[in-house]
Amino acid sequence: MKSTLALFLLVLGSTATTSVQAGARDWRITQPAWTEEHEYQFGQFVTKLGNAVENRRCATVTECLNSPANMFYGTDPGGLKFFADCADLPYYLRAYFAWKSGLPFSQATGFTANPAGPEDFNKDIRYSTNGNSVKYRKDVLTKKNALRRPVYPDAVSFLNSDLINTVSTAAYRMIGDVQGATYSDFYPARLDRVGIRPGTVIYDPNGHVAIVYRVTEAGRVLYIDAHPDNTLTMGLYTSKFMRSIPGQGAGFKNFRPLQLVGADMDNGTYIGGRIEAADNRNLAAYGTEQYYGNAPDPGGDWKKGQFVFKGQVTNYFEYVQLKLTNGEPVIDPLLDMKFEVIDICSSLKDRVAAVEMARREGIPLKQHPDRLPVNIFGATGEWESYATPSRDARLKTSFVDILNQAQKAMKKYRAGDRTLRYNGGNLAKDLFAVYAQEATMCKFSYTTSNGQTLLMNLEAARQRLFNMSFDPYHCPEMRWGARKPQELQSCTDDQNKRAWFDAERWLRNQTDRRYDVRMDYTVDQLGSGPKPGVGAQTAPDIDIVTYLKSQM
């Protein structure tokens, strides 16, 4: 397999040094079916992009695809916009790869929500209660004109508009068990290294999508994700990605392999025909245990399904890690602590760019709207582009997670659990040492309202986490949770914005992202306290320092 890939990359390398040829916008299908080799190559394509994002060699979709991180670098015609948000990114990369590789592509473009009893308040198909079904599809095919000459699809137009304008997270919100003409673009992945690999998609039912670029030897899953401002970030798969009812299709899924059938060959390209998709029964990487557990509930309740590894019941996220470990399946608590703190550090640095973009665009200088959006997690306009409620909720969940993981590790250690790998004499002390070292090393800075640079580290961010405003109309100091007068003196927020900051504290305490409730309150309405499903009275415990010191 790898020798074939080496030849594939050699050809690409020679192509990249030549000028783009006429007809480069044409999508010519020269290979009628996606094979395992193509899936491997697609995974390598994503891996190269992911490595570049991880090492901060590029930070946007445009930068990454216009750099050597793109294995097709130098072969593109002019006019490509290279733009994608989180839902677009997997489709964009898949379509781009298919075009460059001469492969067929098809996309679900219309959906209907599955019956769910009472309708959601916003009737938004992206957050349907019982998931969606495919209603329409679009196949990328070559046709012939009146003179019987081939008319190739324009790949640039397709990527720039046709694809981007039709993709949303609604396309991911399904389990993937329907076959035939209304098949889903994805199928659920097996929980092993066959099913979860570079190119696998991760769907969070709270409205976020990522794509895997590496699975480590220790079983940790690394992903890249895009945002409405076209930035690309990387992260670690943890409990910040929720599980939900199976019909919503949360979790790991792979693109369904496609095949062009009934086409005619004309001068090396396939003309006409139709696209068919692989059936779940013929997919080695297909599996549904992520929904029901490997010990399903006899009554069919997905929440009661258990994940049992070598006779021991474990939680879902730990089960995934154990199943993906290459070698002896054990949990190394010190390595996990390091991974998770590094992941949080990366998220904080990415947040710097998001807050800075709002500052540069002058959003904090604008008057605050009279009401919040209908839903702060699923908004449009300036709020979608510059607010950070979803990003901040995932960040808070990550801090909650490292405390929970430390507590579970201590429990396993004291119980002599065989799935835990630790040979030291004081686990709490060693966990604290890892946290302290990584938290101290994680340094970043933000630009204040008067253009000064203020340096922070991860532990400082933890201590002010629930004071950090997600509201784009607040000054950078408030966005970063400033509390001391010396730091706040450069803030330009007026009394009304300070009132909004105080009123939003309930929302800052909330770690779960709710799309099924209204949030368009005024400052007075919000300030009276949490509403049903909106906000929390108190923030969750994230004090990893106090906990570990108490266990030494």
Image (cartoon, helix red, strand yellow):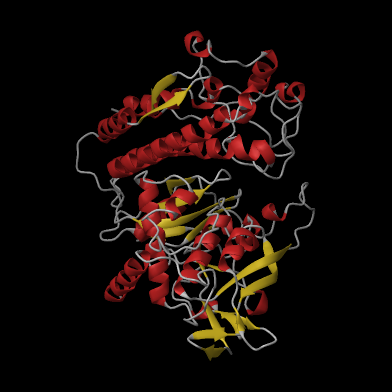
- Specify whether 279 is left or right of 339: right
Residue 310: image quadrant is bottom left
- Residue plotted at (67% across, 43% down): 378
Residue in front for this viewpoint, 299 or 359: 359
Quarter where residue 516 is shown = top right
Q: Is residue 313 visible?
A: no
Horizontal side of 470 relative to 373 (left or right) equals left
Frontmost residue, 478 versus 290: 478
- Where's residue 431, x and y in %? 29, 35
Quadrant assignment for the C terminus: top left
Position above or below: 338 against 141: above
150 lies above or below 135: below
Residue at the location (23% across, 33% down)?
A: 426
Tell whether 347 sits left or right of 152.
Answer: left
- Image x and y of residue 38, in percent: 41, 73
Q: Is residue 532 above or below residue 275?
A: above
Which residue is at the front of the view, 483 or 386?
Answer: 386
Picture coordinates of residue 301, whole percent (x, y): 60, 59
Q: Position of residue 190 (x, y in %)?
A: 45, 67
In the depicted view, which residue is nearer to us: 297 or 432? 432
